[in-house]
Amino acid sequence: MSEVHARLRTVRGRFSLDVSFVCPARGLSAIFGPSGSGKTTILRCIAGLERIDDGYVRCGDEVWQDADSNRFLPAHRRGVGYVFQEADLFSHLSVRGNLEYAAKRAPERRVASGDVVEWLGLSRLMERGTERLSGGERQRVAVARALLSSPRLLLMDEPLSSLDEVNRAEILPYFQSLPSHLEVPILYVSHSLAEVGRLADHLIWLVDGRVRAAGPPASVIGQLDFAEWRREDASVVVDARVEEHDDEGHLTRLDGPWGALWVRRQQRSPGERVRVLIRASDVSISLAPEPETTIMNQFRVRIVETRDVAPGEVMVSMARCEPAPFDGGTAADAGPALLARITWRSRERLRLESGREVFARVKSVALLE
């Protein structure tokens, strides 16, 4: 397993790219940002499909390109698997033929064909022609073919962008489980927050050709800078654990960073980890708990910071008052932020300021499943 270190500076017309980041040796690292921010350019530079004006790309101890020494390892020698937005399969071959073609050309065997077929649920599709595959099935075959080339690094460039909602929902569980099977890093490009929030172990936030932040998804997405950039779509994405089920009420209790979190009944076992998304617009603030309400999820929290993000609009960042046992926190670590988008008038009327303890009321929770 090898970390990927990149320092990329290049100019493409009126666009300039100037980034530096590390892709961990295992797991899925997502590059997230709007269209035109340089995500695909980064992947093409790492793959060796484009040269950089300045900087370097290093995979483990091997330097793939270095502008200072004029070193440039061609794409076919980098051992990179690349999955594009549109699955580029051989139309004259069956699924089996496409996979066998990739396996035969691999310089070494890192994964077994049977394992890849199982991981991506392709066994019933092996004899089918590629023209008879759905969009989601085509992308699963494209990923399998990339893996059977025995890559040292798997690059995925918005592989779900061309799929409809049904096909996207079909393929996401396969992508979600993939890092647990692989001993190579995955670098995944997307402009969908729900997508990277569900899949990413490490998040690189990119805007206008610059890295604004990088780290665990919860820490990046929970930043006020990120929330201000997202505005109406500001959210937090955090990990939680299934604790118990209330069958009579058709509810499941999760243990999360701020305490117990009730959601609709889940078909999951106690102890199982889940990832949830909470929109800032679905969080309100009160100075005291409100038992006479339909909102079940209320947390005692401490205001970390408030920020004016638009005329009359304020973003509030809050943290748990005590260390969170779920995360193994200490007194100095209150865990991930919880965000609320409120009006300027509400902040002034309730005198909300840094350090004040309040109660956050969460109206809606989305499980990223």
Image (cartoon, grey):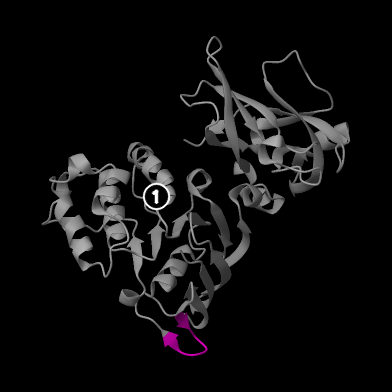
Give the image location of residue 126, x and y in percent: 17, 46
The reply to whether the magenta stretch includes residue 302 is no
Above or below, 71 against 157 in this view is: below
Please state which amino acid type lies under the numbered disc 1: His
**Whole-percent x, y for residue 220 in the image:** 63, 52
Q: Which residue is mark 1?
A: 181
Q: Determine whether 347 is above or below 45 in the image.
A: above
Please report the bounds of the magenta region as a residue range.
Answer: 64-71
Determine whether the residue tagged by mark 1 lies in a helix, strand or loop. helix
Q: Residue at the far top: name it.
A: 248
Q: Residue furthest bottom?
A: 69
| Residue 75, picture quadrant | bottom left
Does 124 appear above or below 159?
Answer: above
Residue 44: x and y, percent? 40, 70
Is 13 left, or right, of 316 in this rendering? left
Which of the 4 quarters of the picture holds residue 142?
bottom left
- Residue at 42 percent across and 60 percent down: it is 184
Number of callouts: 1
- The reply to whether residue 320 is in sight is yes
Q: Is residue 312 visible?
A: no
Label 1 crowd (10 A; few <14 / some 14-19 / many >=20): few
Q: Is residue 23 left or right of residue 341?
A: left
Q: Nearer the viewer, residue 249 or 86?
A: 249
Q: Is residue 207 above or below residue 339?
A: below
Name the residue rendered at 63%, 62% in the picture. 212
x and y, in percent, of residue 263 in the image: 57, 24
| 95 left or right, relative to 247 | left
